[in-house]
């Protein structure tokens, strides 16, 4: 948070806070969350993408217990980005079952992680990381990033070149980390990934 943002936050606390002193930490935390995502336009118009759904892939997919965004009438449509209100509508109408999917772990965000999430042609300052999960093994990550210029969430998977050498896979591009590649297909992730994203979206 820069100095001006901090000043505005403190002014808001002074001008608006009227509660009991015991509640002030919660109040400040809420304001910080609001400030953290101030680059997201919550008034952006919904599109026909709000009719997409979160669903399991076909049973023939070995990861069929996980979820991905899907077009209701054309399930093979590639979906890699979506705006705030479309995503919020979809994720709040999602009704997950008991299937868990792969064991994934949320991870801290640093510059090394950020480089693995961006194409070599992406401009670093145009993006903010929303969440990053490490897959069962540390050679693959799944994540959501936000393009501030486009006002779009991008949902991606990245993996190491070593992982690619051991797997027959073609849909990928270079990242800003020379040892990592980015999957260009629709993100497929476990229930935990989507539940965590839902909590973030609903607190923006």
Image (cartoon, rainbow, N blue to C red):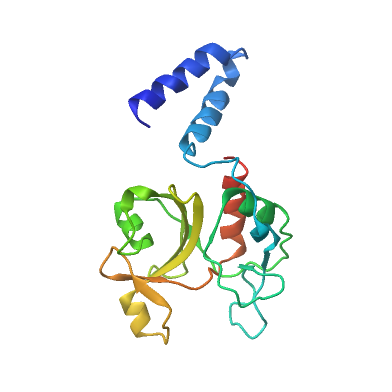
Tell me: residue 6, above or below residue 145.
above
Q: Report which quarter residue 112 is drawn in.
A: bottom left
- Image point 37% across, 49% down: which residue? 126
Give percent across and percent down for residue 139.
Answer: 37, 71
Q: Quadrant of residue 203?
A: top right
Farthest residue to the left: give it.
178
Q: Nearer the viewer, residue 188 or 88?
A: 88
Tell me if 43 is positioned left or right of 95 in this view.
left
- Provide residue 23's location: percent of width, then percent of height: 60, 20
At x 55% / y 30%, what residue is drawn?
A: 30
Residue 140, horizontal then vertical, whole percent: 41, 69
Horizontal side of residue 78 vs 147, given as left or right: right
Q: Residue at x 52, y 65 (%)?
A: 80
Tell me if residue 116 comes above or below residue 56 in the rendering: above
The quarter of the image holding the N terminus is top left
Classify 43 as above or below 93: above
**Residue 120 lies in quadrant:** bottom left
Residue drawn at (38%, 51%), measured in percent from left and top?
A: 109
* Residue 15 in the figure: left or right of residue 45: left
Is 137 or 194 nearer to us in this picture?
194
């Amino acid at each position: 948070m820069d100095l001006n943002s901090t000043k505005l936050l403190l002014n808001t606390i002074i001008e608006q806070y009227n509660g009991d002193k015991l509640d002030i930490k919660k109040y400040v935390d809420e304001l910080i969350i609001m400030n953290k995502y101030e680059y997201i336009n919550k008034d952006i118009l919904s599109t026909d993408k709000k009719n997409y759904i979160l669903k399991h892939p076909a049973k023939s997919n070995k990861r069929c217990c996980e979820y991905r965004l899907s077009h209701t009438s054309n399930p093979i449509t590639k979906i890699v980005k979506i705006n705030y209100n479309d995503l919020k509508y979809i994720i709040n109408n999602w009704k997950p079952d008991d299937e868990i999917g792969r064991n994934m772990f949320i991870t801290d965000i640093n510059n090394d992680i950020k480089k693995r999430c961006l194409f070599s042609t992406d401009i670093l300052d145009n993006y903010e990381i929303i969440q990053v999960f490490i897959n069962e093994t540390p050679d693959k990550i799944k994540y959501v990033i936000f393009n501030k210029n486009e006002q779009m969430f991008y949902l991606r998977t990245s993996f190491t070149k070593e992982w690619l050498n051991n797997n027959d896979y073609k849909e990928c591009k270079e990242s800003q980390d020379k040892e990592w590649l980015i999957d260009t297909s629709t993100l497929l992730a476990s229930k935990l990934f989507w539940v965590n994203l839902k909590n973030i979206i609903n607190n923006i």
